[in-house]
Image (tube, helix red, strand yellow):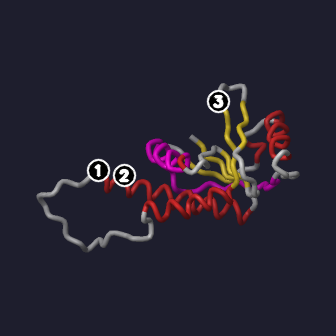
Amino acid sequence: MAELRLLPLDEVLDAKEIVLLSKKLAEQGIDDLPEGEDVIEFDAPLSEEQLDDFMDRLAAHDIACSIYLPLEFDETVDIPNEEAEHKSVGSVHRLLEALEELREELDVDSEVDEDEEEDEDEEPVDLELVDEQLSYAWRVFARAAVACANRQIPLHVIH
């Protein structure tokens, strides 16, 4: 299961990666990294499939990252590490903008009336399930992104 957590950067990045991130953000005019110390876990895990599908949606908006900082900057930053995987870092403010656009695309606010009766002969449509999963993932990301911005603690997407 994948999850979103608010964690200090040093919980996920080593000292070299933090220095590299600082240098790359300095090129975008960001001088200080957030220093939040709290650890906050969200009680809403996502399946790997839900996360992958939602990250694909975020990638279409150029904001699919593994870490979101409560800072305003335009370009995502890639941090290579020794484990052969890189971490991408983006602005939670850009994530919030993308989430607002995705809200409209996914029609998150319009809920299906649960009292509607379905024809018993109809098979459930797979697309409805996908839409429900994407809406759920949207809600999880939206709640975490708002908490990140308000508490000034980096948001981490953990696989």
Crowding near pointer 2: few (<14 within 10 Å), some, many (20+)?
some
Estimate the spatial distance between the alpha carbons at disc 2 and disc 1, rounded to whole Å: 6 Å
**Magenta part of the chain:** 34-59
User: Residue at (44%, 59%) from the top-left corner?
Assistant: 135
**Which numbered circle lies on residue 130?**
2
Q: Is residue 65 left or right of residue 35?
A: left
Residue nearest the viewer, comparing 36 with 138 = 138
Residue nearest the viewer, comparing 128 with 10 = 128
Mark 1 element type: helix
Say whether residue 79 is magenta.
no
| Sequence-earlier tag: 3 or 1 | 3
**Numbered circles on residues, count:** 3
Estimate the spatial distance between the alpha carbons at disc 3 and disc 1, rounded to whole Å: 33 Å
Residue type pointed to by label 1: Asp
Would you name the residue on which mark 3 appears?
85
Q: Position of residue 94 (x, y in %)?
A: 66, 57
Specify the farthest residue to the right: 31
Estimate the spatial distance between the alpha carbons at disc 3 and disc 2, rounded to whole Å: 28 Å
> Above or below — where is 47 with respect to 106?
above
User: Residue at (75%, 60%) from the top-left corner?
Assistant: 152
Proximity of marks 2 and 1: CB atoms separated by less than 8 Å: yes
Would you name the residue on which mark 1 appears?
126
**Which numbered circle lies on residue 154?**
none
User: Residue at (56%, 57%) from the top-left corner?
Assistant: 141
> Above or below — where is 116 with respect to 56?
below
